[in-house]
Amino acid sequence: MLKNFALALCLVGALCAAEQQGWYPHEGSLMKYRVNIRFGEEPDTMPDGWKFGRVSSVATDANGQVYVFHRGKKADPIVVFDNKGNYLRSWGKGMFGNPHGMRVDKQGNVWITDNGDHQVMKFTNKGELLLTLGIKGKAGTDPKTFNRPTDIAFTPSGDAFYVSDGYGNSRVVKFTKDGKYLMDWGKRGAGPGEFNTPHSVGVDSKGTVYVSDRENNRIQIFDANGKFLRQWTHLGATQNLFITPKDEMWIITHRDNIENITYDTLAGRIMKIDLATGKILGAMESPGHWINVSKDGEIFIGSLTGNVFRWYAGWLTRGLGAEEGLRPANQK
């Protein structure tokens, strides 16, 4: 009788514990980074009165400079900083309808997508305009137009690039390095090779193309000519993806497209992904619309909250309680 009673208590306790389960583990493992949540604004070295609006994207170059593309009216749309967050230069006032994507190629040129004016532009790193694709203010689906393009990715050799196009269209367009139309693929839908908001595109060292099919909650994978190879459906609604020269994939993603839109990108996670298998190697929380990993391994997030987050290696070993972090560093 006593044994049965004890067993019943154990079962009740187990059920209660199950009902009260709290935090779930991070996928893969917890990535241990620290964060500067106001990169570029703390310290404040921009011209007087300048501040970011919604930050749509961020990119870094081989020299460690950080390029911020934002939608505010209190600073130029493209603002450049050194790796410590000190203001260097800026450009673009009056040039864009709605800033969206930004990438820096191997030559240090800065490419942007403007999903308000349906254009893709290429600049030098000083802001000189080198190339414009698309017709300003005209949405279309032919080789000379876009409909709210979102992102750019370059082939390993640099002889061509891809544009995900985007909010209005449901396709990926391939061009030569000089902007000559080569081909496109995709249409609206949920089948293989179909898209519902291709929001980001990336290319690995073998030329394989990865497309964030955001509203379909998947990443689709293609060869260089748009042939469907496979898809990953376990990563949620991926806002943006970044592939390093060493074929390390990083994404900023959300549980699903409804959560993403409802929370206005606030409930996101950064994840590191194994390219060969799609396995999640690690994760940590972060809002975000765009992700970039610098040559030094720092993670930069462009957030629609009006922030650039700089994540860097490091983990606190104690908190801020009276018996913890507030003690002098040399006191044990």
Image: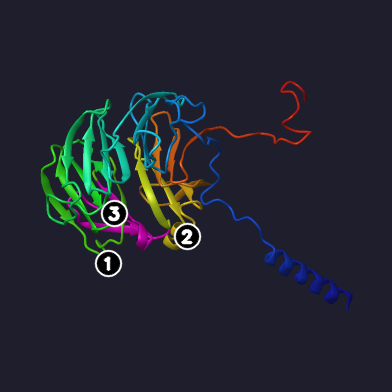
For the residues marked 1 and 3, what is the alpha-carbon distance in whole angstroms? 16 Å
| Quadrant containing the N terminus in the rendered view | bottom right
Looking at this view, name the residue that lies furthest to the top: 330
Provide the residue designation for mark 2: 262
Can you tell which quarter of the image residue 88 is in? top left
- Residue 133 lies, in percent from the top left, at 16, 43
Q: In the displayed structure, does residue 281 sit left or right of residue 158? A: right
Query: What's the residue type where badge 3 is placed?
Result: Ile
- Residue 284 lies, in percent from the top left, at 53, 46
Residue 155 seen in this snapshot? no
Q: Which mark is residue 189?
A: 1
Query: What's the residue type where badge 1 is placed?
Result: Gly
Magenta segment boundaries in residue numbering: 208-234
Dot 1 surroundings within 10 Å: few (below 14), some, or many (20 or more)? Answer: few
Choose the circle earlier in sequence order: 2 or 1: 1
Choose the circle earlier in sequence order: 2 or 3: 3
In terms of secondary structure, where does tag 3 sit? strand
